[in-house]
Image (cartoon, rainbow, N blue to C red):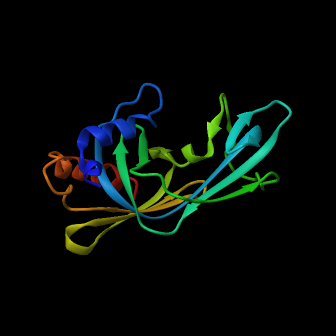
Amino acid sequence: MSGIFDEKNMMQALERHLPAGERIQAGIHGIGIETEIRQIFGKCVLLDDKIFPASHGTALEVRKSKYSKFDVYIGITEQYLILAECEVYKHLYEFDDDPDLEGIVVEELQECIPIEDIGTCFLLEDIKRCVIKKGWMGSVNCGITMKNGSSLKLMLPKRGGMGGGMPRHQEYRDAIIARLGKRG
């Protein structure tokens, strides 16, 4: 558990989900309260917990949900909100190979994607609404709704754990809150 509160470990975990050309500007340990991720992929097939691009494939809607608290690293880049789970957690996955595509952006895959990588990287411009409220013991709760209907409920703690492994927690937390607050 103590390894979770280590800035070097956090940055390594966040960097695994970085889009090309992006760099982490701020990152903290937080608590995922509830997530409901929705993504639709075009011309693909699902095989063994991986989604493959396939010219003969169909559209596939993936819903990935978690309704209990979990440790998560929360990072921000110039254009993205990045989430990296601190440990391996179980999620509820639902698949629909005949989704309603009206008004929905369909993502075309260029390469295989494991389903556990879904819901780790979000364009800041795709945030429809972000509600920031003060929480318990100085924490801040963020309720984020994306344009595609995905939602995230995250808690950003006031402190970065015991032992001083996250010396820039307050600075990074303030930067994340400021960036998300602009999306409110």
Q: Tell me: 22 left or right of 2.
A: right
- Up the image or down, 47 lies above or below 100; here it is above
Q: Which residue is nearer to you in this view: 75 or 129?
A: 75
Residue 29 can be seen, yes or no? yes
Picture quadrant of residue 54: top right
Task: Say left or right for 165 vs 48.
Answer: left
Q: Position of residue 49 (x, y in %)?
A: 67, 45
Q: Against 133, is 144 above or below? A: above
Above or below 34: residue 177: above
Q: Residue at x 56, y 58 (%)?
A: 150
Q: Residue furthest bottom?
A: 136
- Total number of numbered labels? 0
Which quadrant holds residue 147? bottom right
Between 131 and 12, the residue placed more toward the observer is 12
Residue at the far top: name it: 21
Quarter of the rendering occupied by the N terminus: bottom left
Instruction: From the top left corner, tell me how far across and down residue 151 is, in percent.
Output: 52, 61
Locate the C terminus and report the quarter of the image it occupies: bottom left
Q: Seen in the image, is 92 located left or right of residue 72? A: right
Percent coordinates x, y for residue 145 in the rendering: 50, 60
Relative to residue 172, is residue 112 depicted above or below?
Answer: above
Q: Is residue 120 left or right of residue 78?
A: right
Residue 52 image point, x, y percent: 72, 35
Q: Do we see residue 77 in this rendering? A: no
Which residue is rendered at x = 66% and y = 28% of the image?
Answer: 110
Instruction: Identify which residue is drawn at 66% across, 33% down.
Output: 112
